[in-house]
């Protein structure tokens, strides 16, 4: 890995695997001898941001997560909130309509999508995604 340079202080040639909390603590202590604490804090925040961004981009590239389909999202929400099909009547309509939706026999209407989003907090992106029939 290239030298870690923050401000005008270089840590030398450091491998990524050597960047432990102990190493960063020693680096911080040395840096505090040269600059004020707020500068060191800004430097550490910059390093934290670099690693957070690298981690997020690596995960997005190598482990992409797709949003669930609408029915899977509804069922997950029901499970998390301990809801029964009967609890969806105010949102979807009659109980038979709820079962038709949950069994993929009937598509969600725009009004249902809006009420599910507002009432249960399900992301609209999941609710408007084309449904995949369960096998």
Image (cartoon, rainbow, N blue to C red):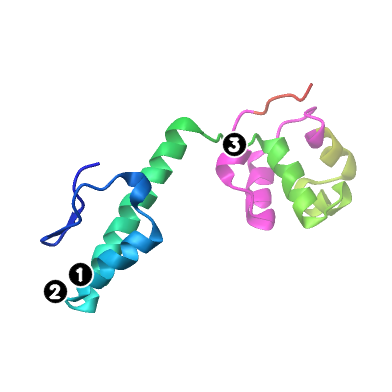
Task: Name the secondary structure under disc 3.
Answer: loop
Q: Residues within 10 Å of mark 2 (few under 14, many from 20)?
A: few
Q: Position of residue 95 (x, y in %)?
A: 88, 44
- At x 89%, y 39%, the residue is 96
> Which mark is nearer the camera, 3 or 1?
1
In the image, 63: left or right of 38?
A: right
> Does residue 66 show up magenta in the picture?
no
Between the residue at mark 1 and the residue at mark 2, the CA separation in whole angstroms equals: 5 Å
Cβ–Cβ under 8 Å for marks 3 and 1: no
Quadrant of image for the N terminus: top left
Between the residue at mark 3 and the residue at mark 1, the CA separation in whole angstroms equals: 52 Å
Task: Name the secondary structure under disc 2.
Answer: loop
Q: Check disc 1 and report the residue beneath it.
A: 31
Task: Name the secondary structure under disc 1.
Answer: helix
Q: Position of residue 86 (x, y in %)?
A: 88, 50
| Magenta residues, start to end | 101-130
Q: Position of residue 42 (x, y in %)?
A: 25, 68
Q: Check disc 3 and report the residue beneath it.
A: 128
Q: Check disc 2 and report the residue beneath it.
A: 34
**Measured along the vertical axis of the image, is residue 84 above or below residue 1?**
below
């Amino acid at each position: 890995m290239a030298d870690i340079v923050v401000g005008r202080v270089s840590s030398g040639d450091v491998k990524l695997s050597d960047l432990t909390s102990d190493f960063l603590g020693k680096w911080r202590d040395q840096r505090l001898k040269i600059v004020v604490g707020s500068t060191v804090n800004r430097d550490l925040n910059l390093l934290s941001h670099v690693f957070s961004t690298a981690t997020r981009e690596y995960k997005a590239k190598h482990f992409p997560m797709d949003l669930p389909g609408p029915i899977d999202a509804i069922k997950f929400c029901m499970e998390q909130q301990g809801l029964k099909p009967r609890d969806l009547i105010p949102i979807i309509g009659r109980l038979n309509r709820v079962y038709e939706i949950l069994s993929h026999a009937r598509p969600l209407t725009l009004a249902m999508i809006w009420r599910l989003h507002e009432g249960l907090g399900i992301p609209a992106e999941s609710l408007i995604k084309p449904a995949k029939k369960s096998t």
